[in-house]
Image (tube, rainbow, N blue to C red):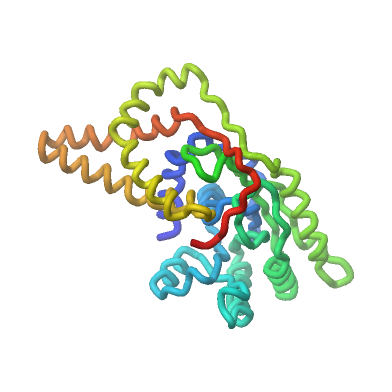
Amino acid sequence: MLYSLLRNFIKIGLQWYIADLRPMHLGKAKFQGPTLVLSNHPNSFFDALLIAAYAPVEIHYLVRGDVFRNPFVNVVLRALYMRPIYKKTDDPEYAVKNEFTYDECMQVLRDGKHVLIFPEGKSHNLWYLQPFMRNGLSVLLERSYKRNIPVQIQSYALNYNSFLSVPKSVSIEALHTIDSTEYIENGSLQIESIIALTQEALKKNIPGVPLKPNVLAENKRKLLFVPAKIGYYTQYWFYKLWKNYIAKKTQGTIFFDSLLFGALLFSYPILVFVLSILVGNLFGFWWGIFIFMLLPSTSYCMSKYQHIPVETDLKTERVNYL
């Protein structure tokens, strides 16, 4: 229940945050059985949010283990179908804890559900596919085979115009599904063949350069001009405050989009609600309703009207810790 509500809330929020959103070939993702979902990982937690919003099913996630240290955060993340995966630097008992996580993943897959793993392991705000950290993926494939779980492998290719600017141009493309049962030879699963095929498919569909934004048609620009300007002069200050704050806090890291989107997703509805209540109390109920409708509609037009820049720094690697 919580997952479904949050997923729909995120999907709505993405319409404001991403001006040029391109879902591509999503019908290829059938999810007709237990599935390992794979993707390139250029933009931290934002990648997972994007896949969660546009995959047609509920997905369980393998997430960096260090964020589960807080007991309250641990409960919340697990309620959202997230499971910890640890590196040597995260915890001295990483191997034992990962064994428990892999067992949980097997139960999820046995129930016919789906697990997302980013096989690159780390995110560095880069436009090309990084080498796979094969251990986690290999373990999940091997265990699923030994436990007679006929997993499919569903890959998504993600691309962005920039990791440091909003509004954004983003593409999410579903690739052809791989059926692991077709790669069983002489009583063993050909794990290396599956991984190589997955890497090849992702490389083929990741161009290695920033996504070029679509140009907004002139008739649409004219239509959006007035409401976009209203949105700009009434609400841009709120976005700017958050952007400057998050940019300062995340400078040199990969977390700009993840934290900025999260901050806006939960704080902007509160802003709209509070301003609507204030106006309603001061000028009457219907004025409050008018503001409640005016603010989000004009901010939406503003996000679609603004210029979408393309990032030019393609070499600088950013760290994956705050």
Q: Residue at x 34, y 26 (%)?
A: 229
The quarter of the displayed image where residue 17 is located: top left
Tell me the quadrant of the picture where the N terminus can be found: bottom left
Task: Tell which of 41 and 12 is nearer to you.
Answer: 41
**Any part of residue 48 in sight:** no
Q: Is residue 291 found left or right of 255 in the rendered image?
A: left
User: What is the count of numbered marks?
Assistant: 0
Residue 244 percent location from the top left of the image: 39, 46
Task: Tell which of 261 and 111 is nearer to you.
Answer: 261
Q: Is residue 118 above or below residue 206?
A: below
Task: Tell which of 50 and 231 is nearer to you.
Answer: 231
Q: Residue at x 52, y 55 (%)?
A: 253
Q: Residue at x 56, y 51 (%)?
A: 43
**Any part of residue 16 in sight:** yes
Residue 150 percent location from the top left of the image: 71, 65
Residue 75 percent location from the top left of the image: 42, 71
Residue 228 percent location from the top left of the image: 37, 27
Q: Is residue 49 found left or right of 71 in the rendered image?
A: right
Q: Residue at x 44, y 59 (%)?
A: 3
Q: Is residue 156 above or below residue 2?
A: above
Q: Is residue 52 above or below residue 66?
A: above
